[in-house]
Image: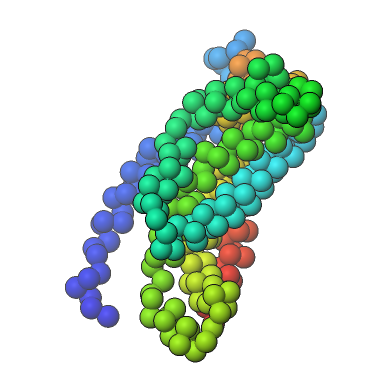
Amino acid sequence: MNRKKIYPLYLAVIPAVVFTIFFIIPSTAGYYYAFTNWSAARTSDLKFVGLENILSIIQSSKVPVAFVNTLIYAGVKTVMVTLLGFVFAYILNRDIRSRTALRTVYFIPSVFSCLVVGLIFSAVFQTRHGTLNNILNLFGIANIQWLGSRGTAVFAISMAEVWRNVGYAIIITLAGMQSVSSDYIEAAMLDGATEWQMFRKITLPLIMPTVNVNILFSLIYGLKMFDLIYVMTGGGPGNATESFGTLMMNEMSAGRYAQSVAVNLVFTLLLIIVSMLYQKFSSRWETVE
């Protein structure tokens, strides 16, 4: 190893110190309020109440709904974004006309803010005069209240999130595919390998690290979904589409500050567990034989 290329330790220490001061310490200190009686009615002389807030959150009827919805959002987003990103990246990696323009078109939704995307899809799924219902009316199908019931509302929010994020998955997967050396492909073609065999034995194993990055990002940001839900339904009707993000916001808006922080603490622990489990199992998929 050429030791001249080893960077000095302080280049790693400085970012770590900055990250600790401006993120780790404030976040950790903030979790203290989950164990107090902090609320809109009591902002001073706070008392330590132990696990009371966490237990009340866990026992709340809202948490199971938010938990299931969060898993649905994360699962649908992870599967759909990863698969669509893979399919479109595979198509755009081929020698086709206007592929540069198509890459730009597919990435445009990723540039829009969550607010804009939420307003667009709210108009699409609106019960009266909504774009989707207008199309269905042409075939004699009555208006559907897409955002009026849990099943269709969760579906609508999930589709909006997939549309907004698939561009990132395409770019990341396409970069992985273009990093695969053409020498491997040419050698396989000389050996008489079919396109499916080249994809399964060469392309897919070599881009698995890229696919894993896509899956991890989609999973984490799917679990953290808040903006689109808040814009499109606000967690409603009732709390039917609530996620951990909207649950935190609604608890804070109701003046239950300590309970809001308790939800955040439980959610953070969930994110850490999911990330650690995924990292443990995904490392096996990156092994190329």
Count numbered badges in the picture. 0
Residue 125 lies left or right of residue 116; in this view the side is: right
Residue drawn at point x = 22 percent, y = 71 percent: 5
Residue drawn at point x = 41 percent, y = 49 percent: 103
In the depicted view, which residue is nearer to us: 203 or 210?
203
In the depicted view, which residue is nearer to us: 175 or 244?
175
Q: Can you give x and y, in whole percent of width and height, for residue 112 in the image? A: 44, 32
In the depicted view, which residue is nearer to us: 135 or 73?
135
Residue drawn at point x = 77 percent, y = 33 percent: 151
In the rendered image of this protein, does residue 52 appear above or below residue 38? below
Q: Can you give x and y, in whole percent of width and height, for residue 180 in the image? A: 41, 71
Q: Can you give x and y, in whole percent of width and height, for residue 166 in the image? A: 52, 46
Residue 112 lies left or right of residue 14; in this view the side is: right
The chosen color scheme is rainbow
Task: Quadrant for the N terminus, please.
Answer: bottom left
Q: Residue at the far top: name it.
A: 41
Which image quadrant for residue 107? top left
Q: Residue at the far left: name it.
A: 4
Task: Quadrant for the C terminus, please.
Answer: bottom right
Which image quadrant for residue 194? bottom right
In the rendered image of this protein, does residue 1 appear above or below residue 33? below
Residue drawn at point x = 55 percent, y = 14 percent: 43
Report whether residue 39 is seen. Answer: no
Report whether residue 187 is seen. Answer: yes
